[in-house]
Amino acid sequence: MTAVASSLEMPATPGATEDDRVLPGGWYTLFAMMIIVLFAFVDRQLLILAAQPLSESLSLTDSQLGLIQGLAFSIFSVVAVYPIAWLADRYDRRLILGACLVLWSFGTVGCGLAQNFWQLFIAAVAIASGEAALGPLAMAFVPDLFKGRKRVLANSIQYIFTYIGASLAMGMGGSALGVLDRAHAGMPSAFQHLESWRLAFLLVCLPTPLLLMLLARTRLGKTNNVADTAAPSAPPVPIAGFLREHRAAFLSILGGLGFYMLAYGGFMVWLPLIGSRLFGATPEINGYGMGLSSAVGTCFGVATGTLLMRFYMPRLGTRAAVGVSWRLLLLTCPVLAIFPFVQSVTQLYICMGVMMLAGTGVGCLVATTLQVMAPAHFMARFFGIWSIISALLSGASPSIAGFVSDAIGGQRGLLYAVVLVAACGWLAAIVLLRLGERHFEDLVKSVKEAA
């Protein structure tokens, strides 16, 4: 942990002179946002953990589940993200996020009340559209409130919490389902006609008023930053021309990281259902088991990515993050070959933990890789492009795996489908990142020259 902490204290860029400071309300805003993100994760993870009883109650196929858990989230997150970001740049960000929080809470209630596929799909769309605010707002407020090395620290805390929060959310969702299952018979008659999974969706919306009160005291605001007054030495480079000029680097690096997202996306969505079908794991067992394996894998993954960066930076220089990413993916390929042959839910969780190690080891380097690929004047739009790519590919993964599972059939068909989709994405990511190293190095030099 010392090595990780020391790496987080490194300046964002060599020779940076900006003061290391946090503006008033910065830490409160950071931790308030993380609490809001945690409860957003609970809503999302509950839809995953309740997949088995939900699909039985509503008579859903794997393809329909894949559409709900995959495309409903990916497509509508992408559709909503730019309008939300546009509004957040012009109005009080607290109002925008508050409205989105209410929207995804209504969507969560809708999941609990859904009676068929289309009602559940519409509710999932509401959750996805509301939660689309979290990405742009989380990226927008940190540079405003955290300066110098404190900004790097704040970004790193947010990244680590993203995965730790997902693990906590999975445990909380599993616990809610387990408690409601055990207490269902003793509930008032008004609630006994509702299945436990429906009650769980209604229960997790109760903190919404408290989250709105927490949000009201943050320093999100419209903007907290003062624009740089120094005149640029040259006209800004147009984004379209810059992307076209360096298309080899953008296609290889964004394509490689996109395929990494495709490979990674199906596991988190489908493994709880696989554990239930193959080994009889309850939602509560899946919540605890996957939460623990995710948390352990995340901690070791971030530490591994950090240590590998310290080792390879003197050797690879600018392209260290890209080089570490494809090497880490290559080292964990054997785990994909083991997955189809697991014989217990414990083995399933262990394999998932190793995949989390690789995934978060690469994931913690994504920001480091992308932040040097574009000039500052269109950095936000560049991250928007990446958001679209990552959302579409990670969201398409569960849907593709669902269709492949229906085609394969059999008791282990879903497990084989998830591994097949992941293997294709994993190998494509390795090849593209390896081929893109030199192009990435040339691109970084051009960015520095354009600054």
Image: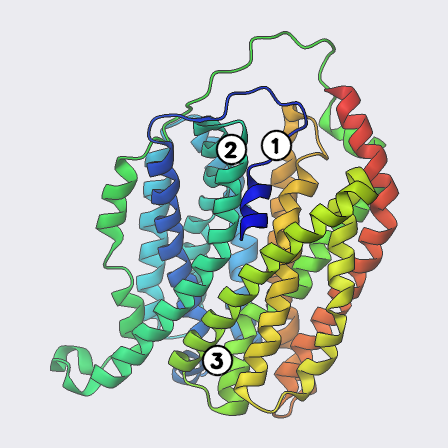
Say which residue label 1 marks.
12
Three-letter residue code for mark 1:
Ala
Q: Secondary structure at mark 1?
A: loop
Please identify the quarter of the rendering in which residue 394 is found.
bottom right
Name the front one of labels 3 and 2: 2
Q: Nearer the viewer, mark 3 or mark 1?
A: 1
Depth check: 210 or 301 in front? 301
Q: Find disc 2 in the rendering and name its residue.
A: 151
The disc placed on residue 71 is none
Q: Dot 3: few (<14), some (14–19), or many (≥20) neighbours within 10 Å? A: some
Compared with residue 432, is residue 437 higher up or lower down, i.e. above or below? above
Q: Which residue does the image show at 52% across and 67% down from the upper left?
A: 296
Residue at 64% x, 92% y is 410
Nearer the N terminus, badge 1 or badge 2? 1
Work out how far the residue at label 3 is from the one at label 1, CA to CA, in angstroms. 48 Å
Q: Which residue is drawn at the image coordinates 37% and 41% (left, top)?
A: 97
Q: Quadrant of the C terminus?
A: top right
The kind of residue on which mark 3 rests is Leu
Q: Secondary structure at mark 2?
A: helix
Q: CA distance from mark 1 to mark 2?
A: 8 Å
Counting from the top left corner in percent of width and height, residue 421 is at 71, 71
Foreground pick, 214 / 385: 214
Give the amino acid type for the residue marked by disc 2 in the picture: Arg
The label shown at residue 60 is 3
Q: Is residue 9 above or below residue 193?
A: above
